[in-house]
Image (cartoon, rainbow, N blue to C red):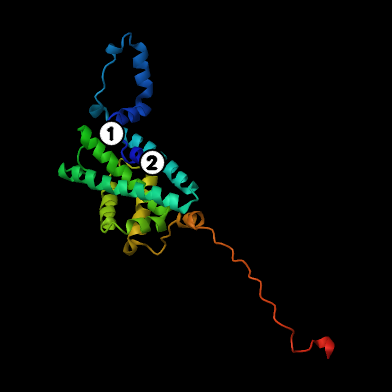
């Protein structure tokens, strides 16, 4: 599950994603061709640009929400913790690796959308995983912090990642931009406004708190005969 969500545009996955956007054209082309060899091969690096990818990005964000709903449906705390740890570890790894590629090739929001397959994948993975990180931390903050406390530089790393990602406002949808604003305040206390509140924290409290065991009332041992006479005896 995590490998699919954290690595969305790798190899054939990129072609599969583009089918969502160009499916009708592709099907018409296949229907018109008499021979498979006559179907022209698409150069995905020429098709993909910021406008096309912005549509792919929205689809990926919808998948992120499905994942959050799945995590929320897991009542077993240990099972959810294990799954979230796998996911957050993978996200941190992707942000480190793909961020290095983007910096090394000077890919920014102001530069031209990359034409190289590897750089397209790196940018997509970076933007999507930053937002996925935001979804997880905002919906499950307490468990997320417990997992992330073993990653010494996670706060600095992800603050830089969300700042980088927010700059691509021509690709991101409004809800994702809002999410990153909440994430920045959630993980950086000094950035919080007086009105800040994590709208998802209450949901986590209800879902993840293990049920409290009812204390059994222990039967008090009966004492011997009372030396104090009852009122009826007076």
Return the mark for residue 196.
none
Q: Quadrant of the N terminus?
A: top left
Q: Quadrant of the C terminus?
A: bottom right
Q: What is the quadrant of residue 194 in the picture?
A: bottom left
Can you say whether 45 is above or below 217 in the image?
above
Alpha carbons under labels 2 and 1: distance apart: 17 Å
Residue 50: give x, y in percent of width and height.
28, 36
Regarding mark 1 in the picture, which secondary structure is present there? loop
Regarding mark 2 in the picture, which secondary structure is present there? helix
User: Which residue is tagged 1?
Assistant: 10
> 226 or 148, which lies in front?
226
Residue 147: give x, y in percent of width and height.
35, 56
Q: What is the quadrant of residue 28 in the picture?
A: top left
Q: What is the quadrant of residue 122 in the picture?
A: top left
Which residue is outermost to the bottom? Answer: 234
Can you say whether 149 is above or below 1 in the image?
below
Which residue is outermost to the top? Answer: 34
Residue 59: give x, y in percent of width and height.
38, 36
Residue 17 appearing in the image: yes
Residue 167 appearing in the image: no
Residue 101: give x, y in percent of width and height.
19, 42
Which residue is outermost to the front? Answer: 224
Return the mark for residue 61.
2
């Amino acid at each position: 599950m995590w490998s699919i969500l954290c690595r969305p545009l790798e190899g054939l996955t990129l072609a599969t994603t583009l089918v969502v956007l160009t499916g009708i054209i592709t099907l018409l082309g296949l229907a018109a061709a008499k021979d498979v060899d006559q179907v022209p091969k698409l150069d995905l690096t020429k098709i993909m640009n910021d406008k096309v990818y912005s549509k792919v990005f929205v689809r990926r964000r919808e998948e992120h929400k499905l994942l959050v709903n799945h995590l929320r449906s897991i009542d077993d705390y240990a099972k959810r913790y294990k799954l979230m740890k796998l996911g957050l570890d993978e996200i941190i790894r992707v942000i480190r690796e793909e961020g290095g590629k983007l910096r090394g090739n000077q890919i920014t929001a102001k530069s031209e959308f990359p034409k190289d397959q590897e750089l397209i994948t790196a940018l997509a993975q970076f933007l999507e995983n930053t937002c996925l990180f935001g979804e997880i931390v905002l919906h499950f903050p307490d468990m997320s912090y417990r997992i992330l406390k073993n990653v010494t530089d996670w706060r600095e790393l992800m603050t830089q990642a969300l700042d980088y990602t927010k700059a691509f406002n021509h690709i991101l949808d409004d809800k994702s931009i809002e999410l990153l604003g909440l994430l920045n305040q959630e993980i950086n206390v000094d950035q919080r406004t007086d009105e800040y509140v994590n709208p998802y924290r209450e949901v986590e409290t209800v879902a993840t708190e293990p049920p409290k065991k009812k204390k059994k009332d222990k039967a008090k041992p009966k004492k011997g005969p009372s030396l104090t006479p009852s009122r009826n005896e007076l």
